[in-house]
Image (cartoon, rainbow, N blue to C red):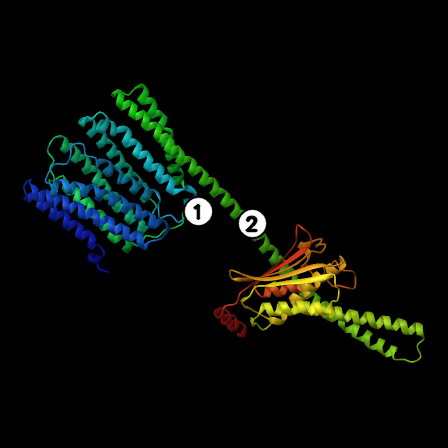
Amino acid sequence: MSLFRRFRWFVLAGGITLAFAAVSLALSRGPLLTAVSDVTYFLLILAASVAMLRNAWSEQGVSRSFWFLMGAGCLIWALDLAVWNYFEVLRRTLVPRWWFMDVVLFLHLIPMIGAVGLRPHRSDDGERRFRGGTLEFLILLGWWAFLYAFLVFPSQYIVPDAAIYNRNFSSLYLVETGVLVLVLGITTRGAPAGWKMVYLNLLLASAVYALDSQGLSFALDRGKYYTGSFYDIPLIATAAWMAATALTAPQWKPQAIIYPGEDKWGAMALRLAMLAILTLPAFGLWTLRWDPSPALDRAFRLFTVLIAMLVLGVFVFVRQYLQDQTLIHLLGQSRRTFENEQRLQTHLVQREKLASLGQLVAGAAHEIDQPLTVIMDFSEKLWSEQRLTSNQDTLVRKIVTQAQRTRDLIANLLSFAQQRPGEKIMVDVSALLQRSVQMRELQRRDQKIHIETSIEASLPQVWGDGHQLFQAFVQIVENALDALEESGGGLLSVSAQHHAEEVVLSFSDNGPGIKEPHRVFDPFYTTKPIGKGTGLGLSAVYGVVQDHRGQITCQNKPEGGAVFVLRLPTGKPVEAQALAAAQSQ
């Protein structure tokens, strides 16, 4: 992009300023010069406000708020100029001596100060929410409105005095523009390149406006000012400069960045806001003891102090309440984050434990299986001998039975140790769940045990191995039924629901519960009698769920019994194809 194209709006702003300067010097004082000056000034400020609001429309988050507040300030400014045009251009009369639109002119800088105070170049959103930016802006608005009512209103409306009014308004407006320039200067320091260009141009334009406003006020007091005079050239330059800045800002691509360390300026701004509120009693004391103004002025100022203390006190109370709620929310987030980290750590430890144990078990099982095979062979040969006594036959039977039981245990160990990701397809969880429950219902004839199922209609499919999932469901149901059988009967509730991007399966019983629920997935941990369980079933279930990118938890219910909750991610066609491709590689 050429240099001229990059800065074309600033070139146009400079051209408009030079053209107005030529017109101002060429034309004498009169209606034509007044119309040219007022209309040009109004259109430039209106263009700046439109450009800023357009930027707000295209931005997000705090950047949108920044441009919206800047545009609102320019719109208020344009409103003041529109009324000014009505009197001087349309009616061709002087503006009233007691100009009510001075309040509007004074207030237009407050949204701009608030916009800069947002510091959109920082991306610390959590901290910004903590500061309560909206309420701080309302406190700022209330504070400046109080200052205007306290210093300007008495000499404007209560006991009119033109000299005091002009002096107080000019002084307060100078302070306000100075504050805008000051916060722009502080914010410019350390800002990234894009935002620095925005801040710097607004800073220079505001500085020119502040200086010219005071020069114009002095000229007005001495009767040397008229609309379209030399004093209006900097005003036109300021308006054109702000419009060019707003139009060029998207090319600078201002981006927010994260700043390490403490936000000293944010903390200082909050302290200044609190200090401003604490100065209200000082204003009231000065009015009561040392204010030389007429009694009506003093009474109005005291009333203003009381109203300001009430309004700003409400803002402070609301801000403190929202801050407390934010702190509670942050504490809740910290607690949930800590719990999630603990849960993740537990899962990682469990997976490493299963992986290490699997390698150990595989080696041991192979070593044990070889001599066991020899024992089985010779025991069967010995059993087939016809010359054994009845007592010997009984002993050989026991040897064969225990050897067979040991072989089954080794088979379970090998099955646990050699878990591998199976071939995965889209499977119907509801069908697997119903089949596992029905199979266990057919195998058990205990009338004291009841199974209830609640499966959501149109349950989405998951991406997984149907055989592995079915075996996992059977294992959990079998464990629950064993617990109910030991307690003399009860109810097992099985449910399946769709939540967000997960299928949530729940197996809840009203049995005696689990003595150590945090250990149920540990290998070889079992509460069943010796010979009935190996303690590997739920460990294998845990491995299956992890292989399917899911989660499984176990806990005792307050009313009694235990509940297992499985969370399996739902399968999407695109994800399924990607996973299938990854498996095939």
Where residue 234 sits, quadrant-wise, is top left
Res 538 visible: no
Q: Is residue 218 above or below residue 547?
A: above
The image position of residue 281, as x and y in percent, is: 36, 26
The image position of residue 151, as x and y in percent, is: 26, 28
Q: In this view, does 376 lie above or below 531?
A: below
**Residue pointed to by mark 2:** 338
The image position of residue 467, as x and y in percent, is: 63, 71
Kindly give the residue lying farthest to the front in the view shown.
447
**Residue pointed to by mark 1:** 126
In the rendered structure, the answer to whether residue 563 lies left or right of residue 445 reads left
The image position of residue 406, as x and y in percent, is: 78, 69
Is the C-beta separation of discs 1 and 2 under 8 Å?
no
Q: How crowded is mark 2: few (under 14 residues within 10 Å), some or many (20 or more)?
A: few
In the rendered structure, the answer to whether residue 106 lies left or right of residue 25 reads right
**Amino acid found under the numbered disc labelled 2:** Phe
